[in-house]
Every structure is written in structure tokens, then in C-alpha cells.
């Protein structure tokens, strides 16, 4: 492969794949025409306005009441688990193949390019301060600033404030091609946080209005802290905590840690109920079936990053149903 194929250089595959998939959550498109309380999408539209216009032009006023223009959240999935393959992994077969190559073969230009730009081992950001963002977006250790630009409009920290970036790089365009025109504005991500990204923080207030305002303020504080941490990780990666990517084999060996990573940030004592922090919490007899049910929910699954692959759900379900040792 090294001799005959054009091996990606300048960081290779890991330059992109050290980061997780572009998770689009909360997903707010398409707008669907549905009958009554049905969850079947009869016809999809790019906006509520387009759906409303179609209703007016297609149905008499008396018949329109039978239909609604609604957003139906699809089966969100955080992506496949994968084993990292790198020619610089000392335990990998590709690395051993490279070491065994003849001196003549090592004069191949692809080999020279590959050796000139060693690949970083892909890692994920797991620093607690970044969890508000990293809970749904798997942030890797490669080309950090580029990845942040592609997901957050308020990514440039100047004078202790975040500012929208100027222009778009290729990763930004790749991400933005998957969202609507209305979401491509500089303030889109801020609006998403305020409308759908409110964290389940417990607060004490004298009124519903005060409670909502306080929760929104605290949520934005969590996101600001996360953005600052991510920005810091771009400049000083050594100050941040990293971990390997999840693979199926690792999920089988570390099921409890996988559940903690996907659930415990929100299900903490100061946030959502039930509290899911310890192994006993997850395996409580009154909670096991509820947790499994929520993970399997097709239209609004937990964790918020999306419904996990079936193979992972099977492993986690088996783990949860086993009694504590």
C-alpha cells in the first residue's frame, strides 16, 4: 500500500479522524407535514413557512386542521466505533511492514512523504471543563482550531470575549453543508444553546420565569467554560486530558466507564435525576429497565449525542442486567 498507493500525508487520516463525527444535535430539520399526532413524515420541507404555504395551496381550510407542520427528530447516531490504524503505531502490522521494507523501497516518494509528516495518535478530549461541548461532539487532538471553527461560531477568544470567525475554512464548509441556511449565521450556535441546549441544572427560584432565566444563565456559563477550555487545548494541548477512542472491544471491557462518559455529566447531583454516577446507581433495580428503554428510544434517544449502535446497546444492556458482584 505504501509503495503503490498515494498515502495521505500531512497528518494522514488522523488529521480529520482524531475528531469524532459531526454530530448535528439538537437536529431541527426537516420540518414535516404530519397527520394529527402521527410521527410519520408525509412530506418534508426546509422551513415552517414552506410547509404552511403548501398546506394553504393544497388543502381547503376545513381540512387543514387535520395536519400539522412539525419537526420530527430522527434517529440520531454518534457514529461508529473504530480502531485507530496508523503506520506509526508500534504494535500495528502496518508499522511492522514499514520497518521491514528494503532500503530501495524506502526511496519511494510516498514513503518519504509519510515519514516526513508523522501522524499523531488520535485522542479525544475528556477534560471535565469541556464536557458541555464534548458530551455531544467528540473533539480530537488533531488540527484543533480547525475543528472548533467548523462547529462553533464564537470560536475566537479576544479581550476575554469570544468573537465570530472571519470567513470559512474547508472543514467549516463541510459541516455547514449539512445544516440549513438559517443555521449558517455567526450567531447560530448561540441561538441553539438558548433554545435547545439548556442543561438540566437544578435551581431554586421564586417563579418559573426566574427559574428559566437562572437556568439559561448557568447553562451559558457551562458552555463558555467549555469553549475557553477547548480554546486553551488548541494552544496548550499538554494542559488537557485526553483518552483513546472507543472500540467495541473496549466497550466490552469497560462498560461502566462508557456509561459514565455518556450519562454522568447530566445525571449528577446538581443536575438531572436520577443520579447516575456510581456502578450501584446504574444497576439500581428500579432504574435498569428505564435506562435501557431510554437508550433504545428511536426518536429522542439518550445519550443526547444520539442512539448508540445496536451492538453497543446489546453490550450495555447485558452489563446493566447483571447483578452487582
Image (tube, rainbow, N blue to C red):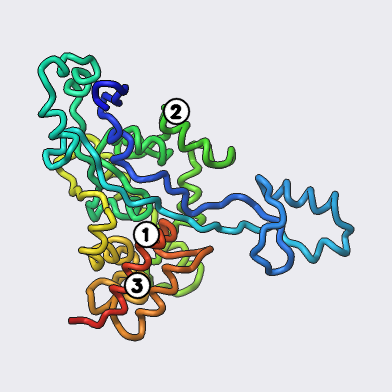
The residue under label 2 is 168
Mark 2 lies on a secondary structure that is: loop
The percent position of residue 96, horizontal first and vertical second, equals 13, 34
Quadrant position of residue 265:
bottom left
From the image, state whether disc 3 or disc 2 is nearer to you. 3
Q: Is residue 186 left or right of residue 63?
A: left
Q: Is residue 66 above or below residue 242?
A: below
Q: Nearer the observer, disc 1 or disc 3?
A: 3
Number of numbered discs visible in the structure rendering: 3
Rendered residue at 38%/74% (across/down): 291
Q: 216 or 177, which lies in front? A: 177
At label 2, counting other C-alpha atoms closer than 10 Å, the crowd grade (few under 14, some 14-19, many 20 or more) is few
How far across and how far down the image is residue 248, in percent? 28, 57
Q: Secondary structure at mark 1?
A: helix
Q: Residues within 10 Å of mark 3 (few under 14, many from 20)?
A: some
Residue underneath mark 3: 317
Q: Earlier in the sequence, mark 3 or mark 2?
A: 2
From the viewer's side, name the closer residue of 220 and 72.
72
> Residue 302, position in %: x, y?
42, 65
Q: Residue at x 73, y 50 (%)?
A: 51
Local SS, label 3? helix
Residue 218: which numbered mark, if any?
1
Using the numbered discs, state the Cα–Cα distance from disc 1 to disc 3 in whole angstroms.
Answer: 33 Å
User: Is residue 159 visible in the rendered structure shown here?
Assistant: yes
Marks 2 and 1, Cα distance to the nearest angstrom?
30 Å
Contact between labelled residues 3 and 1, with CB atoms less than 8 Å apart: no
- Kindly identify the residue that appears in the image at 26 percent across and 61 percent down: 251
The earlier-in-sequence mark between 2 and 1 is 2
> Is 270 displayed left or right of 79 in the figure?
left
Is 15 located above or below residue 250 in the figure? above
Residue 49 left/right relative to 174: right
Across and down, in percent, residue 197 comes to 45, 56
Amino acid at each position: 500500500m505504501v509503495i503503490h498507493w498515494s498515502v495521505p500525508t500531512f497528518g494522514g487520516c488522523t488529521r480529520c479522524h482524531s475528531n469524532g463525527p459531526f454530530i448535528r444535535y439538537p437536529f431541527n430539520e426537516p420540518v414535516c407535514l404530519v397527520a394529527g399526532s402521527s410521527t410519520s413524515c408525509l412530506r418534508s420541507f426546509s422551513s415552517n413557512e414552506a410547509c404552511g404555504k403548501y398546506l394553504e395551496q393544497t388543502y381547503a381550510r376545513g381540512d387543514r386542521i387535520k395536519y400539522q407542520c412539525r419537526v420530527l427528530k430522527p434517529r440520531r447516531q454518534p457514529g461508529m466505533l473504530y480502531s485507530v490504524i496508523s503506520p506509526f503505531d508500534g504494535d500495528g502490522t502496518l508499522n511492522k511492514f514499514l520497518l521491514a521494507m528494503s532500503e530501495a523501497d524506502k526511496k519511494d516518494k510516498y514513503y518519504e512523504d509519510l515519514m516526513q509528516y508523522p501522524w499523531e495518535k488520535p485522542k479525544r478530549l475528556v477534560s471535565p471543563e469541556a464536557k458541555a461541548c464534548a458530551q455531544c461532539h467528540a473533539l480530537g487532538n488533531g488540527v484543533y482550531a480547525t475543528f472548533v471553527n467548523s462547529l462553533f461560531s464564537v470560536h475566537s477568544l479576544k479581550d476575554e470575549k469570544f468573537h465570530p470567525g472571519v470567513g470559512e475554512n474547508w472543514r467549516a464548509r463541510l459541516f455547514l453543508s449539512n445544516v440549513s441556511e438559517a443555521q449558517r449565521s455567526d450567531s447560530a450556535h448561540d441561538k441553539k444553546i438558548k433554545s435547545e441546549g439548556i442543561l438540566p441544572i437544578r435551581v431554586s427560584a421564586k417563579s418559573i420565569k426566574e427559574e428559566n432565566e437562572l437556568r439559561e444563565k448557568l447553562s451559558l456559563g457551562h458552555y463558555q467554560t467549555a469553549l475557553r477550555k477547548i480554546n486553551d487545548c488548541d494552544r496548550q494541548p499538554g494542559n488537557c486530558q485526553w483518552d483513546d477512542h472507543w472500540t467495541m472491544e473496549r466497550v466490552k471491557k469497560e462498560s461502566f466507564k462508557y456509561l459514565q462518559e455518556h450519562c454522568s455529566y447530566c445525571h449528577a447531583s446538581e443536575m438531572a435525576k436520577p443520579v447516575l454516577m456510581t456502578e450501584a446507581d446504574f444497576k439500581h433495580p428500579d432504574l435498569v429497565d428505564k435506562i435501557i428503554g431510554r437508550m433504545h428510544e428511536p426518536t429522542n434517544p439518550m445519550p443526547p449525542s444520539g442512539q448508540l449502535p445496536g451492538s453497543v446497546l446489546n453490550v450495555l444492556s447485558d452489563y446493566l442486567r447483571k447483578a452487582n458482584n
